[in-house]
Amino acid sequence: MLETFDEHRAAGLQQRAEAYADNAFGVDLAMALLQSSTMPFFIQDRYRLWRSNLLGRPCVLMAPRSDLGREGWSELSRHRAIVCNQLHGELIILLFDALPSRRRKKLIADRMAFMVPGAQLYVPEMLLEVTEGRVTKPPLAQAPEQLSPTAQMVAIGALLGREVEGANATALARRLGVAVMSIIRAFDELQAAGVADARRIGRERTLHLQAEGRDLWRQIEGRLQSPVRKVRRVFIPYPDRFPGLMAGESALANYTALAAPRIQVQAVAGADWNRLVREQALVDHPDYGDGEDIQTWTYDPAVFAERKTVDRLSLYLSVRHHPDERVTQAAEQLLEDMPW
């Protein structure tokens, strides 16, 4: 029989991990419980597993259901390897409420990724270490194939004329609602991509773009990705109180001549989803009514919103590969109407 796992403790650990990632990097872990029919029974008995994404890399967070004890620690490496093999080599990050110093040193010596929310994150596969708010990582050696959500926000802000040029990291982080460390990493990405120069003035780093308008768009469009992480059909009991923004085909209908869809589409920040479910009493897959499609985004759509509608460029990125030709044609109209 499966050991009873304190759901309150599990929810608290998940919440702390998501908050830690958001504070350290401005990223949404959006941890989702992993359910696998092929995972060995004893692994499910001893660990709680969540699927997630860290700085653009899919991963699984693996938390012991109870105190490991001496025997559990001796088996941890083997159990982690089993989970890794079951998930075809996916990145595994061990997750702990707390961790004694000697255990941390042993995990680091064994190059096993782990997270202790609020204290430390160590992921050797990504050359990443965060200790009590201090981040150490090597500079980007080459241009990233895709920009991170924060770097994409900075680029879109520049394209929309939102005072990004010459902004320092602290001010820009405050304006975009993300961690300063995430902005510094975004500066590194944009510099590596060859579209910006991140200069240091005193103790601050400032961003200076090497292109603007249509030229900037052409240089980075291939590195940009849809901000939509997931779409859920839900029933919203109190629609007047729901903070979602018009998105998808609903937003396209506002910007272009495309007909409004039967099911309204809205967008919210992925980091806010769990809170909104509680506060708004949202119901997944309602058995009554048509509901609404709610997109959760990798960054906050409200940052660049226009009249309660997501911005044109983020909208374009979210629908440019839509299977309906009418939608992709309307998406191209968004670019044609941009005041480059």
Image (cartoon, rainbow, N blue to C red):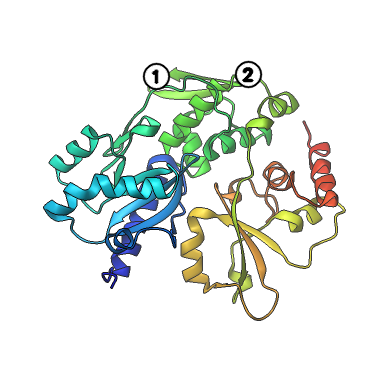
Q: Is residue 132 above or below residue 72?
A: above
Residue occupied by mark 2: 210
Residue 318 shown left or right of residue 182 in the figure? right
State the SS at label 2: loop
Q: Amino acid at mark 2?
A: Gln
Instruction: Please tell me which residue is depicted at 87% across the width and 53% down the height of the picture.
Output: 257
Residue 332 shown left or right of residue 76 in the figure? right
Question: CA gap, disc 1 to disc 2?
Answer: 22 Å
> Residue 299 placed where, x, y %?
55, 47
Q: Quadrant of the C terminus?
A: top right
**Depth check: 223 or 265 in front?**
223
Q: Is residue 322 above or below residue 241?
A: above
**Depth check: 224 or 178 in front?**
224
Mark 2 closeness class: few <14, some 14–19, many ≥20 residues within 10 Å:
few
Query: Number of callouts in the render?
Result: 2
Residue extending farthest bottom:
288
Residue 138 shown left or right of residue 160 in the figure? left
Residue extending farthest right:
257
Q: Is residue 184 above or below residue 232?
A: above
Residue occupied by mark 1: 202
State the SS at label 1: loop
Q: Quadrant of residue 7?
A: bottom left
Mark 1 vs 2, N-terminal side: 1
